[in-house]
Image (spheres, helix red, strand yellow):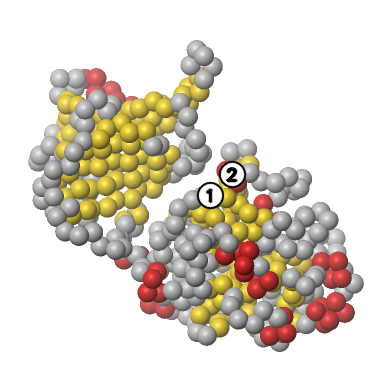
Amino acid sequence: MILVKFLIIFGAFHCAFAQRYDVCGDAGLKFVYMSAELGWVGIGWAWIRDLGDIRKVNLYLEYESSTEPDPNNLGKLQILNLIPLINPKNEKNYNMVYEFIPPSQKHKTNITKIVWKDVILCDLNVTKPYLVKMHDEYNFYTKEQKLRTEVVNRLTPKPTVEPVQLNSSTEDYDDSEVVGCGRVDTRNIYVPLVLEGQTIERGQWPWLASIYSYSKSKLGFRCGATLISNKLVVTAAHCFFDVFNRRINSDDVLIILGQYNLKRPQDQGSEIVYPESVNIHPTYRKLTKIDSDIAVVVLAERVRFTHYIRPACLWKGPDTKDSIVGKRGHIAGWGRDEHGNFFSELPKQSEIPVVSDETCLRSHEVFVRITSSVTFCAGWRNGTEGPCNGDSGGPFVFKKDGRWTLRGVVSTSLITDGSNTCNLNEYVVLTDVAQFTDWITSFDTDYTY
C-alpha cells in the first residue's frame, strides 16, 4: 500500500512541478500541491553510504509554530521506502524516500531541522515559541516504524520529565521515580496476581520482557527476560547461543518490553529496544559448564516506564538459599503449553516452591551435574505446572517488603524420555540471582536498589 502511495505521490510530483516549494534550505524536501482534497504534502529523499544498524533507521524532523499545537494533530512523518543500491565503485548506498504531512493546510509549516542517522540535512534557527519534534524509527527487515512526537514550549522552563507520544496516548506514561521497582499498576489489573498456571492479564508482569533474534533476515522468539532498571535486562546466558553452539551476534538481538501477545510484537504499550551490549557471565560455558547461566543486556537507550513497562526489584538482603527454601515464588512466560504448542500466544504464570539442594540432588542423579552453589531447584513435580520450553531466561520473583523482587532466572530442566520437551515430573533448575548482584549492577553505575 505504501509503495502504491509512493508511486502516486511521486508521479503527482512531476505533474505538479509548478506547484511546489522547497523547505529548510537544500534538504531534499519539497512540498507538492497534490489536489484540493490532499492539499500540500512534503516529499523528501536523501542518500547515505554507511547506514549502520538497519533495524533502527532514525529520521528526525522539527518544525516551529507561533500558536500552541494540537497534541492530537501534529502531522505525520514516515519513511516510504529505503532502497540499497550499489554504485560503480561497488559501494553500497541507501536511498531513502520519506513523507511529511503537515498538521494544517491553512498556512505554511516552517520546518527547522531534519536529521537522518546523525547526518544533519537541515538546521535553521528557531524563532517561534513552540517547537514540534518528530522522530520516526524504521526497521529495514520488518518494514515496521514507530513515530514519537514531542511539543516544546520555549517560553517556559522545561519540566524534569516530559511525556512522549509513542504511537499511543500519553495515558501510558508513568513517573518511574515515584513508582520505583517491583510495583504493578493495579488500576489496569482486574484479576489477582496469583493464578496457578493460568493466563495472566496484560500489565500483571510489567517487568516481563521477550528476547528475539534474527536468523537469515527472519525474526524469531528466543527467551523471556526481566527488566530491572531503565537500562538493564537480566536473562539466561544460553539464550544467546544457537543450536550449533554459536554465539548470536548482539546486532541480531532485539528486546520487546511490555509485550503481551507473541503474535503482536507492536501492540499498543509495547516497545522494541536494542542492546548496547550483551554480557554473558565469564564463567558460563554452554557445552561444558551450565553453571552461571546468566546474562545482562545493557540497553542502547534508557527506557521510560509506563503502566505496562516497569522494573522488578533486584534481590537485596539475605542471599543464602536456606532463606527461600520452602517458600513459593512466581514464574511467568510464553513457554510450551498443555496443548503441545512450543510457545503459548499469551503469557502464563505459576507459583512453585523452592526445595533444598539435598532434596533436589536426591530426586535424580543428573542434578549432580547441573546444580551448584549458584543455582537452586524449584517445582511441584506434578507433570503439569512449572516452566517449560520457551520460558528460559524468564523471572522467578518473590513479593518481598511489598515489592516483586527477582531472585531466580529460569535455566534448565530434565527432558521427557523420547522427546525434547521439559519434564515437569522433575524439579527445575534456576540461576540464583542473589549470587550475581554485584556483577549485574556493575553494568549501570546509576543503579540503586
Q: Earlier in the sequence, mark 2 or mark 1?
A: 2
From this view, report whether residue 191 is shown above or below residue 371.
Answer: below
The residue under label 1 is 276
Q: Position of residue 209 (x, y in %)?
A: 54, 62
Along the line of sight, the residue nearer the viewer: 424 or 368 = 368
How far, Cα to Cα, is label 2 from label 1? Answer: 12 Å
Residue 22 spot, x, y in % from top left: 19, 26
At x 58%, y 78%, the residue is 316
Q: Which element is circle 2 on?
A: helix
**Left or right: 63 with respect to 398?**
left
Q: Is residue 339 visible?
A: no
SS class, disc 1 = strand
For the N terminus, which image quadrant? Answer: top left
Q: Residues within 10 Å of mark 1 (few under 14, many from 20)?
A: some
Q: Nearer the viewer, mark 2 or mark 1?
A: 1
Q: Which mark is residue 252?
A: 2
Would residue 228 be seen by someone viewing this image from the given angle?
yes
Q: Is residue 320 above or below residue 146?
A: below
Residue type at numbered disc 2: Asp
User: Which corner quadrant of the image does residue 432 belong to?
Assistant: bottom right
| As drawn, 228 above or below 166 | below
Give the residue at x 80% y 74%.
426
**Residue 287: x and y, percent?**
81, 54
Q: Residue at x 85, y 60 (%)?
A: 418
Q: Please, which residue is most extreme toward the top here? A: 88
Q: Residue furthest right?
A: 365
